[in-house]
Image: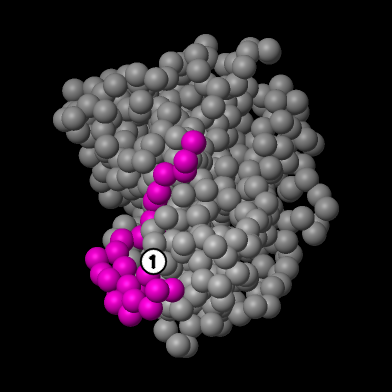
Amino acid sequence: MYAARFAVAILVASSLPWASAAAEDAPLLRSAKLRALQQRVNAGDLTAEPKFFSGLETPLVEAVEGNRRAALVTFIWHGDSTTKSVVVSGGRPKSDWDLALEKLRGTELWYRTEELPSDSRFMYWLTPNAPAEKTDRVEDFLDAHAPASVTDPLNPHALDGESYVVLPDALPFPYQPVVPSPARGSVVDASIASATLEGSVIALKVYLPPEGSRRSNPWLAIAFDDGFEDMGTVLDDLIAIGKIPPLVMVGVVNRPNSRRRDLGYSDEFAAFVVKELLPWAERTYHTSSLPSQRIIAGESRGAGMAAYVALQYPRAFGNVLCLSTAIENEPGYLPPTRFWLRNDDGWIIRRFLEKPRQPLRFFIGVGRFDTSLWTDRLVNNRRFRDMLRGKGYRVHYAEANGGHDELLFQWGYAEGLAAVTARGTERTPGQPRPDHSLHRSISDSSRRTADGRN
């Protein structure tokens, strides 16, 4: 998607070898590489900074003494005389949407070091000279006049305009199959014209399982936001290692400039999914007609929409896969203010509370770092889980050390599809819940069993 902002320790021991007498109030440098640089700069080495940046790739990842399950991650920006501030946004534990970098004394290097679980992976971006003013209005947050954020120019790993980092114990990205050369399915483009949506042609990304694994009437999954990253590779691998049955996944591509409206609990879009798309997929790909072998899935706003479609049409889908559900959303384009200022439980939670329990099975997955923007989605997804369980729904729940991004969603689809297609794996009262760390992915068959899910 956090813990409170990490405290900044103040250096008081000027006798340390990498501190100067004039820098007694400098922040403690946890990064050994930055301490070495600071020592050289303090000694008057004019070549220290350019040598440090030569060939540098960021963020820096360093060991934490005495803790093999953590790593020090240092974000770096190479500024100039015009740089007045830099913030980093995206993943990582935080109490606000962005976190400030500090300037290393005597240099144009800006940095921020965080201690993170060693199985973390997340996306982030940087913004130099961001305005200091804060606002509680979502409209202001999305204002087109906000300063342009950029990918980390020192990080060679980027996806969809954002940088990403994968720590040593995390599931690799891009996805690395457990089976080196599994039988391959295919991802094909398709489309459907919708009378419900005034003749709009909805583009689709459809995954078809390998021919050798296909069976009559396979499972069907319909996923908003056109599926997920490395969809074909992940599904091929999960089928090959027996974690999921052969299935057809229909990724619904968002209409231009319509995502927030269509996935904002739209009754028209829900009707399109159930009355047009679902029959089309069953007819075209000969998928199962059993609700127990159908899945409706989504991420963020799409996760809330998936839950809403299932609640409105409980005989259409028997399984709901929700990733980082945007509980703060209400019908329409955007919520008017930050979620915590509205003093309510969330629109979709209230809808489930109002209605009798339906024959639905849930997977809810969320990142432990997803506590920014205008809401704490980690807390809200836990509340969503608790509400559903209180109503008597069967719920598989998992967390990972990630944010609110494509890396987390990829993990969530792998975990979630395995959970909802399994049978007899629900946690019984009193059974301990395992730690769903990202490196203990559903793909790591040597360290996970079906009985290990909660």
Q: Position of residue 371 (x, y in %)?
A: 63, 51
Please indicate whether residue 212 sits to the left or right of residue 114 in the image. left
* Nearer-the-camera pick, 43 or 113: 43
Q: Residue at left 55%, top 31%?
A: 398
Q: Position of residue 410 (x, y in %)?
A: 41, 42
Q: Residues within 10 Å of mark 1 (few under 14, many from 20)?
A: many
Residue that label 1 marks: 37
Q: Residue at left 45%, top 35%?
A: 68
Amino acid tagged 1: Leu
Please indicate whether residue 32 sits to the left or right of residue 395 in the image. left
Q: Position of residue 211 (x, y in %)?
A: 19, 27
For this orientation, the residue located farthest to the front is 15
- Is 53 magenta? The answer is yes
Q: Position of residue 239 (x, y in %)?
A: 30, 25
Q: Quadrant of the C terminus?
A: top right
* Nearer-the-camera pick, 183 or 260: 183
Specify start and end residues of the magenta stretch as a single range.
Answer: 40-67
